[in-house]
Image: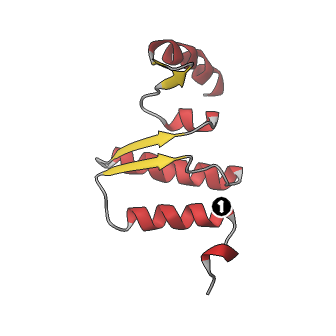
Amino acid sequence: MHYPKELSGGEQQKVALARALINDPTIILADEPTGSLDSENEDNILKILKKLAQNCKCVIVVSHSEKTVKYADEVIEIKNGGVNMQEKLALLKPMFRKKL
């Protein structure tokens, strides 16, 4: 058995996600859910969140990670005190074509 203070940041994040999902919520608010994770675990968590969104859950993710964008259905950027949706989406379309 491990106590919370003995877990790494990534382990704590995975436990927090599991605890949040055990109650089968309709809305999932994830603030930097992959901040302390390595690249492989970041992909795993984002895939889980994407699958939840595809199964009638409302998933809202706040992140600084550019990797998160490729899993998003919608992207809203908050920059310099304003909300910017159209410009961000226009910038992302060419980026996705290159990666696919």
Residue displayed at 60% across by 28% down: 100
How is this picture coloured?
A: secondary structure
Task: Identify whether 32 is placed above or below 7.
Answer: above
Q: Can you name the residue that lies furthest to the front here?
A: 81
Hey, which quadrant is residue 53 in on the image?
top left
Q: Secondary structure at mark 1?
A: helix
Q: Quadrant of the N terminus?
A: bottom right
Please indicate whether residue 56 sits to the left or right of residue 51 in the image: left
Amino acid type of the residue tagged 1 in the rendering: Gly
Q: Which residue is mark 1?
A: 10
Total count of labels: 1
Residue lying farthest bottom?
1
Picture coordinates of residue 4, whole percent (x, y): 61, 75
- Residue nearest the observer in this picture, 10 or 78: 78
Considering depth in this image, is 50 or 25 the residue closer to the camera?
Answer: 25
| Residue 87 image position (x, y, % from top left) | 51, 12
Q: Position of residue 9 (x, y in %)?
A: 67, 62
Q: Position of residue 33 (x, y in %)?
A: 55, 51
* Residue in the image at 60% along x and 50% along y: 34
Against 89, residue 20 (above or below) is below
- Residue lying at 28% horizontally and 47% vertically, measured from the top left: 56
On the picture, is 95 further left or further right than 46? right
Left or right placement of residue 32 versus residue 22 in this view: right
Position of residue 43 in the picture relative to residue 85 (left or right): right
Task: Tell me if mark 1 has few (under 14), some (14-19) or many (20+) residues whose alpha carbon lies within 10 angstroms of its own.
Answer: some
- Foreground residue among 4 and 20: 4
